[in-house]
Image: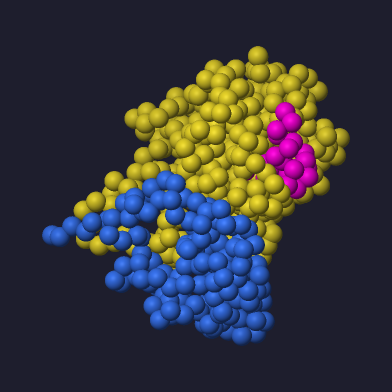
């Protein structure tokens, strides 16, 4: 049995019927979110119903990848072997330009710590984290 | 008019400590015996029980879980004022017992919160060795875990980002968070049940290592094995026991949204729970003599101070820094030292300290003439609060 070195990969998402569209799009460097075809509300995390109007008429739609930084944290503690040589790293939540209030958790890159500030305009950037894992990150726009 | 339908009449703790080696059953047994002895009861006097044990984790992939908070959020039912058995931490069992007694299902109910460190997330790292591939994460956590959000549970989402946003929006400082940490350690120094009792200075606080900025190690509650028990009884039996009853004046819980990552990080369920609490009593924030506010992380204490109306939104920092929350101040907070110092009890210690303060049992840390106490538990998507009064 080959053992896997946990330092080689962060925890990876396990796509299911509800989330596969998101990860498929990310692999193609596109940010798609579920949108309600009846009331126009973006639904994230992915759900079967629109949490505004209960419609099941939801379909993926590409979004601009722009937004503002809702909040953030500079992580100083290693929670998994993959991050041992990556601290300090920054995580955050993005308020989407298309519908502020709909938010996306993410990693923050290309931003010096002193520039981090709630409200900072941000844009998406895709990174191949491992040969089999692409993730959307955000950087200052 | 004072509400006298339900009273807390017995409180107790198990042996508490780091890696005690005790089973969950033994922890629960010890806490129950302590609460029974405190009340002067036997088990024949009890006719109900409600408890919470264990630590929730993500559901296995493909399992179509339906749970009240997630289902309600998906259906757009919010805010919630009630969500059945899914109550978080200790407030869940407490509210179940209070409601069962009010409804007449039971007259005397044992409530327990049992925490066993072996179930905590810190054990997970050891299991990562020897797998054949990367750890896979199902469901919503697939959107956060790959970025390294999973620090010691969910510190970035529960505490660090709310604290950072509080700082950026309201000008709150780390020194203000530290003022709370220093004050409640001072309270702990007067509590024989506290595990950490050495006084701290603000310099000690600022020098303690960061976990996820701006959260320092000293902002985090202290993980322990513990069980906590409280016995509630109906009004007509409240004076049958060893000690004076402490009355449940009002109680509330609230749920808004289902994810710590995506909700409003500064104004969430405590604000709704608090507004409901004050509707259910003639008392108000100015009547409260001490507040026992959940301190899983320091920012949560600040959120409850603001939610309960002890200060305005965004003003908890100056309120704490001015000394209001120290023993002798206008609103002593966490007079037992909080879970950072008495150990993680998921809110039960705040109920127990409220009972002890209103009985006048607290010795050196007793709040003078304490007649009204509020305790609060949890934060974010779900939380609750209970207002208690002294027997008159």
Which quadrant would residue B374 be assigned to in this image?
top right
Q: Residue B345 in the image: x percent, y percent?
A: 52, 35
Relative to B181, is B137 on the left or the right? left
- The answer to if B309 sits in the magenta stretch is yes
Relative to B205, is B146 on the left or the right? left
Q: Residue B201 in the image: x percent, y percent?
A: 58, 25
Q: Residue at x 36, y 71 (%)?
A: A128
Residue B392 in the image: above or below residue A53: above
Q: Residue at x 61, y 85 (%)?
A: A37
Residue B371 in the image: above or below residue B77: above
Relative to B369, is B114 on the left or the right? left
Q: Quadrant of the N terminus of chain B?
A: top right
Q: Residue at x 44, y 33 (%)?
A: B224
Looking at the picture, tell me which residue is in the foreground, B55 or B100: B55
Relative to B187, is A33 on the left or the right? left
Q: Residue at x 30, y 72 (%)?
A: A132
Judge whether residue A85 can be spotted in this image.
Answer: yes
Judge whether residue B88 can be spotted in this image.
Answer: no
Q: How many marks?
A: 0
Looking at the picture, tell me which residue is in the foreground, B113 or B369: B369
Q: Residue B146 in the image: x percent, y percent?
A: 40, 62
Q: In the rendered image of this protein, which colour is used for chain B? A: yellow
Q: Quadrant of the C terminus of chain B?
A: top right
Q: Which chain is blue?
A: A
- The answer to if B382 sits in the magenta stretch is no
Q: What's the image's color scheme?
A: by chain
Which region shows up in magenta? B300-323
Which quadrant would residue B18 be assigned to in this image?
top left
Q: Residue A33 in the image: x percent, y percent?
A: 53, 77
């Amino acid at each position: 049995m080959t053992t896997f070195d946990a330092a080689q990969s962060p925890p990876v998402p396990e796509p299911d019927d509800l989330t596969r569209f998101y990860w498929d799009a990310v692999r193609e460097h596109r940010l798609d979110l579920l949108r309600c075809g009846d009331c126009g509300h973006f639904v994230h995390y992915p759900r079967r119903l629109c949490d505004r109007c209960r419609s099941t008429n939801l379909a993926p739609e590409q979004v601009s990848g722009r937004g503002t930084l809702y909040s953030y944290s500079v992580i100083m503690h290693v929670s998994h072997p993959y991050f041992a040589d990556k601290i300090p790293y920054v995580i955050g939540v993005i308020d989407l330009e298309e519908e502020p209030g709909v938010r996306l958790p993410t990693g923050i890159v290309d931003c010096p710590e002193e520039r981090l500030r709630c409200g900072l305009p941000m844009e998406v950037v895709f990174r191949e984290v491992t040969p089999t894992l692409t993730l959307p990150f955000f950087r200052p726009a | 008019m004072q509400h006298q339908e339900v009273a807390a009449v017995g409180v107790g703790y198990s042996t508490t400590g780091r890696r005690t080696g005790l089973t969950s059953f033994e922890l629960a047994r010890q806490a129950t015996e302590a609460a029974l002895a405190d009340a002067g009861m036997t088990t024949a006097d009890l006719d109900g029980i409600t408890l919470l044990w264990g630590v929730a984790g993500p559901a296995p992939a493909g399992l179509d879980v339906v749970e009240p908070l997630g289902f309600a959020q998906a259906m757009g039912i919010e805010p919630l004022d009630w969500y059945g058995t899914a109550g978080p931490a200790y407030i869940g069992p407490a509210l179940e017992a209070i409601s069962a007694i009010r409804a007449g299902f039971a007259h005397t109910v044992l409530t327990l919160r049992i925490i066993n460190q072996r179930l905590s997330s810190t054990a997970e790292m050891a299991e990562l060795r020897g797998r054949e591939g990367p750890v896979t994460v199902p469901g919503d956590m697939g959107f956060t875990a790959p970025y390294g959000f999973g620090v010691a549970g969910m510190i970035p989402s529960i505490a660090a980002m709310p604290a950072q946003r509080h700082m950026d929006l309201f000008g709150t400082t780390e020194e203000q968070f530290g003022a709370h940490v220093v004050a409640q350690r001072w309270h702990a120094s007067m509590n024989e049940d506290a595990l950490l009792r050495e006084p701290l200075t603000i310099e000690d606080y600022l020098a303690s290592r960061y976990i996820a900025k701006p959260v320092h190690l000293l902002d985090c509650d202290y993980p322990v094995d513990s069980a906590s028990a409280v016995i509630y009884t109906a009004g007509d039996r409240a004076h049958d026991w060893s000690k004076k009853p402490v009355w449940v004046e009002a109680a509330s819980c609230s749920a808004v949204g289902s994810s710590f990552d995506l909700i409003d990080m500064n104004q969430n369920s405590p604000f709704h729970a608090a507004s409901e609490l004050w509707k259910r009593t003639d008392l108000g924030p100015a009547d409260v003599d001490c507040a026992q506010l959940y301190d899983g992380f320091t920012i949560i204490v600040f959120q409850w101070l603001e939610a309960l109306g002890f200060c305005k939104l965004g003003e908890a920092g100056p309120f704490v820094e001015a000394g209001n929350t120290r023993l002798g101040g206008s609103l002593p907070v966490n007079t037992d030292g909080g879970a950072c110092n008495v150990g993680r009890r998921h809110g039960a210690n705040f109920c127990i300290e409220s009972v002890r303060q209103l009985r006048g049992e607290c010795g050196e840390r007793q709040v003078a003439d304490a007649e009204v106490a509020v305790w609060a538990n949890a934060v974010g998507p779900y939380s609750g609060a209970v207002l208690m009064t002294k027997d008159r």
